[in-house]
Amino acid sequence: MEKAHFRPIQSLPVSRSHQKPIKTNQSAQSPFSLQLQSAIQSNSKLTLSKHAKERLAQRGIEINQERWTKIEDKVRQAKAKGVNDSLVLLKDAALIVSAKNNTVITAMGRQEAAEQIFTNINGTIVLEN
């Protein structure tokens, strides 16, 4: 049986002369706490799903900016306590809100909500004013 002949493979050295300069992001230079606070504030706004917008319009439910701010604050508090999906009861409306996604999923009048069974929620927020 013949012995195998191994020859080393010669490779050329890798040239590092064409390195691209490292770009620094200005936001990376700011303190982490400022970035974190900015991210929290931008994510605290509730968005309305297409379905929720339609339901609010169909049912003539109007929620002013002051009430939206209160709802956003309470949803943020609920999220901090581990709530993912919540029922938000207002004086004249009921909203199903995904705290996890900061999205209003659907809306209905309070009378209509009185006759419903709500499933897949793990928190309720009551705002009577």
Image: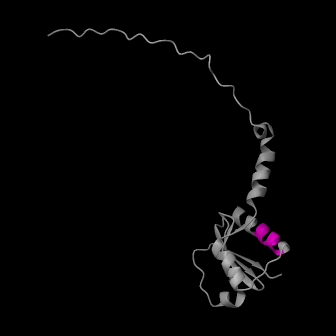
Between 88 and 112, the residue placed more toward the observer is 112
Q: Residue at x 80, y 82 (%)?
A: 128
Q: From this viewpoint, is residue 88 visible?
A: yes
Q: Residue at x 57, y 74 (%)?
A: 120
Which residue is farthest left?
1
In this rendering, the answer to whether 51 lies above or below 5 is below
Q: Is residue 3 magenta?
A: no
Rendered location of residue 92, percent (x, y): 76, 86
The quadrant holding residue 111 is bottom right
Left or right: 26 as drawn, with respect to 82: right
Rendered location of residue 65, percent (x, y): 83, 72
Rendered location of residue 118, percent (x, y): 60, 81
In this rendering, the answer to whether 3 lies above or below 36 is above
Instruction: Please tell me whether the stretch drawn in magenta is mainly helix, strand or loop.
Output: helix
Left or right: 13 as drawn, with respect to 95: left
In this rendering, the answer to whether 96 lies above or below 32 is below
Q: Which residues are magenta?
A: 67-74
In this rendering, the answer to whether 128 lies above or below 31 is below
Q: Residue at x 75, y 52 (%)?
A: 39
Rendered location of residue 35, percent (x, y): 78, 46
The quadrant holding residue 9 is top left
